[in-house]
Amino acid sequence: MTKRKLYEALNWASSFLKEHQREEFAGELLLRHYSGLSRTSMLMNMRDELDGEVWTEFQAAVKRHGEGEPIQYIIGFEEFYGRRFEVNEHVLIPRPETEELVQGTLKRLNSLFPENRKIDLVDVGTGSGAISVTLKLEKPEMTVSAMDLSEDALEVARRNADKLGADMEFLHGDLLQPLILQGRKVDAVISNPPYIPNADQQWMSDIVTEHEPHLALFAGEDGLELYRRFMEELPLVLKAKALVGFEIGAGQGEAVRALLEKTFPQATVEVVLDLNGKERMVFAELDS
């Protein structure tokens, strides 16, 4: 079986990925994953030989990424809020910006419900469960329900909750329909729904468009389809005092704010920028 030194494997991967117009740094991430080495150990042992089986696996993984498959699907996980979440082709890969939605939600829950009573929160379109599992682990006294239209996504979320020790409920259904059918009212609805306009697919990376689930990405001509549907269903499930938190796409802040203000005239609605200065979240606090 062919063997390669670490530096030879890395050089081959960098050249291959560059040729296929992918980020060369992906080669290092994959090499560290398959060799089990930390970045420091890898750099200190560049002249060590890579086990033949590891070289074969690494080579195959680099080729898969060259063809456009996301690294996270190849290695099977992504880090989110300091925890490792399983991901596959049935769920979106959690983005760092979504950690800010979690932070903003926790901050507002603590100020809106200072009496520390038990909060009933739902995460709509949970995907991998990154948002719902994190919120449950960060605020364990909450009752958290994760909902998704995709049964496959719910299975991934369940596995993540089990592995990370989050005791939660999982509901299958379209948007807020599971709650409406139960006649259930909740204190908080959080969602990172599909918000990309269909036409944007033309210029997006094939790593996203050909591998991540379209059900979780695209939402009509202007990307606002799901937010409009939320406005029909939210009044049926929210208590008088409640929090709504959405992740949004660039430039959608004012449109989503207007939808929320029209639906909940008494609410305090706020568009929040992410660390890169882009519109990323909209929160509505109801306290009537």
Image (cartoon, rainbow, N blue to C red):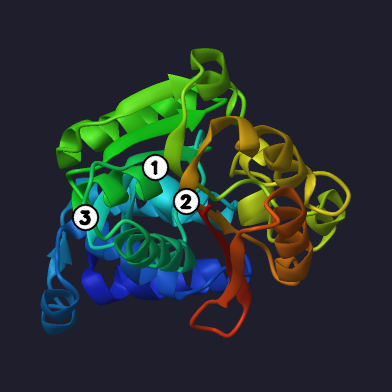
Does dot 2 land on a helix, a strand or a loop? loop
Q: Is residue 148 left or right of residue 7?
A: right
Kindly report the distance in space between the C-alpha atoms of the residues bearing marks 3 and 1. Answer: 21 Å
Q: Are marks 3 and 1 in contact (CB under 8 Å)?
A: no
**Three-letter code, disc 3:** Glu
**Three-letter code, disc 1:** Val
Find disc 1 in the rendering and name its residue: 87
Task: Residue 258: give x, y in percent of width and height.
Answer: 77, 62
Find disc 2 in the rendering and name its residue: 93
Task: Residue 78: give x, y in percent of width and height.
Answer: 35, 54
Kindly report the distance in space between the C-alpha atoms of the residues bearing marks 3 and 2. Answer: 20 Å
Q: Is residue 3 left or right of residue 238?
A: left
Task: Residue 44: give x, y in percent of width and height.
Answer: 11, 83
Q: Nearer the viewer, mark 3 or mark 1?
A: 3
Q: Is residue 180 above or below residue 105?
A: above
Q: Residues within 10 Å of mark 2 (few under 14, many from 20)?
A: many
- Tally of numbered tags: 3
Q: Is residue 5 above or below residue 247?
A: below
Does dot 3 land on a helix, a strand or a loop? helix
Task: Residue 15: give x, y in percent of width and height.
Answer: 50, 73
Q: In front here: 18 or 51?
A: 18
Find disc 3 in the rendering and name its residue: 138
Q: Residue at 68%, 64% (x, y): give it.
A: 249
Q: Are marks 3 and 2 in contact (CB under 8 Å)?
A: no
